[in-house]
Image (cartoon, rainbow, N blue to C red):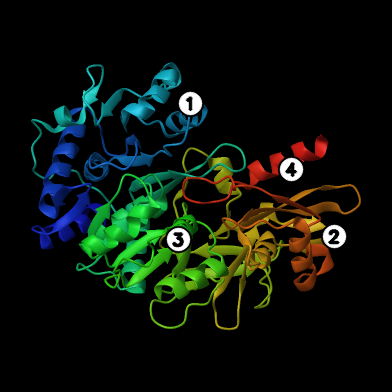
């Protein structure tokens, strides 16, 4: 089955239901189906053929799901682009993917125009707003037929290219097939009891695998409704959940932290919610505990990546173990290995390898990167993880983030979890910095809770009581906030640059 055939079936069964509510606009599944058919036929009329890449570079909008679905129906491969990217990043993604057409809003149109002369493959520009220089979305679909286009799409055909965050060098395009995405959505349907009666509160950006691949695609796959917002505003989240009687919310840890900081957090009736889901970055045990104590909900933590969709999930029924991402999803095989690809004993940290139906086809236009990303059919994730006695997995860091101090391994996540347990700490991030004697030392960046002021000595005492000496941060810096991506991942490369700069002064 392809994404298109799965969506067509869902749209037919749920035709009269509301599919998306977006700031007062309500779109039924039938409208979504017919308008996306129009987009598909219009794209074909513009010369888009099966396998062509088309990009979307805009904030959440009502046009975005129409365009995304229409592009898939036309047989195109969709390239979502991070809305925070600027000319150098855009230049790389457009030229690497060979995208010939893009949907872009006015704010990001300036970025396109600043480097248009370098975007050799880009031929057509579509804008949600009226713009005489480009193709307005309303004009694109004005005379297009709303019948399903006759394009033969196979399960192994490309569907989406998600570009990784590029923390080491230029970002890589992970090509997911229709089969990759559809098989993962099938697993999530089972794991999270996703059904047509659900209503998802979704304020994640629709350029990321979490918002687009899981939130949007998962809801449409199951015939569930979406309360979609342009961006996340903490003060609006709970009132919207109450107003629309939402049953699910997907977010990153930062969202849940901000909800806990809202003044009216206990005044809303959120009894309709059956599950809060968190991913894209580690959820601290302290945030999880505070959320449970405040709202009576145990956040369900899961883990995935651009190359594989979702891989792990805490159970929907049964105990959810704090600090873990749960067990592998149905159909996924997992190994933890040492540097020579020998399996490590349970309880020991190892490099995470996975294989299964959702694992991507490979990096787009980068054969040299594919060669080093697989081992005998297993995808090398770059994560270091542990499996406990109950079969639950926890991440202790990325291979490139691991700190070697005096020949001993320090996993940043372990130190961060300990620091986050201090009652004054809101969140923390740990990085390695050069050390003449030990090779590397541990540095911690710490954000304190609002209205609290303590010295670094308090944190040092806290670490000394609970951590082995070589794991204790030698350097501690209290900062107002941590640099993060739009999906809540801490940008540790930025912190390392900050650390190096401060050491050189």
User: Mark 2 or mark 3, which has the lower sequence index?
Assistant: 3
Q: State the residue in front, 325 or 359.
A: 325
For label 2, the residue is: 407
For label 3, the residue is: 256
- In terms of secondary structure, where does tag 1 sit? helix
Q: Residue 87 carries which label?
A: 1
Q: Which mark is residue 181?
A: none
Tell me the CA gap for discs 2 and 4.
Answer: 21 Å
User: Mark 4 or mark 1, which has the lower sequence index?
Assistant: 1
Q: Which mark is residue 499?
A: 4
- Left or right placement of residue 361 versus residue 138 in this view: right
Image quadrant holding the N terminus, namely bottom left
- Left or right placement of residue 45 versus residue 82 in this view: left
Tell me the CA gap for discs 4 and 1.
Answer: 27 Å
Q: State the residue in front, 450 or 204.
A: 450
Q: Residues within 10 Å of mark 4 (few under 14, many from 20)?
A: many
């Amino acid at each position: 089955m392809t994404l298109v055939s799965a969506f067509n079936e869902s749209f037919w069964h749920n035709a009269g239901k509301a599919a998306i509510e977006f700031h007062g606009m309500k779109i039924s599944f039938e409208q979504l189906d017919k308008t996306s058919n129009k987009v598909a036929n219009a794209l074909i009329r513009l010369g888009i053929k099966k396998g062509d890449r088309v990009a979307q570079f805009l904030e959440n909008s009502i046009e975005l799901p129409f365009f995304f679905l229409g592009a898939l129906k036309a047989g195109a491969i969709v390239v979502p682009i991070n809305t925070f990217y600027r000319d150098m990043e855009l230049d790389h993604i457009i030229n690497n993917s060979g995208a010939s057409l893009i949907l872009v809003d006015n704010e990001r149109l300036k970025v396109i125009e600043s480097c248009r002369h370098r975007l050799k493959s880009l031929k057509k520009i579509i804008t949600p707003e009226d713009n005489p220089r480009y193709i307005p979305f309303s004009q694109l679909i004005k005379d297009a037929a709303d019948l399903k286009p006759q394009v033969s799409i196979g399960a192994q055909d490309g569907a989406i290219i998600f570009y990784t965050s590029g923390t080491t060098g230029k970002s890589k395009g992970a090509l997911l097939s229709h089969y990759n995405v559809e098989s993962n959505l099938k697993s999530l349907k089972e794991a999270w009891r996703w059904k047509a009666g659900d209503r998802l509160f979704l304020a994640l950006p629709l350029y990321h695998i979490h918002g687009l691949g899981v939130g949007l695609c998962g809801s449409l796959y199951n015939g569930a409704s979406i309360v979609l917002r342009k961006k996340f505003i903490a003060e609006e989240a709970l009132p919207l959940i109450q107003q629309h009687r939402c049953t699910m919310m997907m977010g990153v840890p930062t969202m849940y932290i901000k909800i806990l900081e809202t003044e009216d957090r206990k005044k809303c009736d959120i009894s309709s919610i059956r599950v809060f889901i968190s991913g894209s970055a580690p959820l601290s045990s302290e945030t999880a505990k505070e959320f449970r104590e405040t709202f009576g909900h145990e956040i369900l933590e899961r883990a995935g990546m651009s190359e594989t969709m979702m891989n792990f999930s805490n159970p929907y029924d049964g105990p959810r173990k704090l600090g873990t991402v749960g067990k592998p999803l149905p159909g996924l095989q997992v190994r933890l290995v040492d540097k020579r690809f020998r399996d490590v004993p349970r309880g020991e940290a190892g490099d995470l390898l996975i294989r299964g139906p959702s694992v991507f086809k490979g990096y787009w236009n980068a054969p040299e990167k594919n060669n080093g990303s697989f081992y005998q059919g297993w995808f090398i994730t770059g994560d270091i993880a542990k499996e406990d006695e109950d079969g639950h997995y926890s991440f202790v860091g990325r291979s490139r983030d691991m700190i070697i101090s005096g020949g001993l391994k320090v996993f940043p996540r372990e130190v961060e979890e300990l620091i986050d347990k201090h009652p004054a700490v809101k969140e923390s991030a740990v990085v390695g910095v050069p050390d003449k004697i030990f090779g590397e030392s541990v540095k911690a960046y710490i954000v304190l809770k609002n209205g609290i002021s303590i010295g670094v000595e308090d944190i040092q005492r806290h670490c000394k009581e609970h951590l082995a000496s070589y794991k204790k941060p030698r350097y501690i810096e209290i900062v107002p906030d941590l640099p993060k991506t739009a999906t809540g991942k801490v940008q540790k490369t930025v912190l390392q640059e900050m650390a190096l700069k401060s050491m050189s002064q």
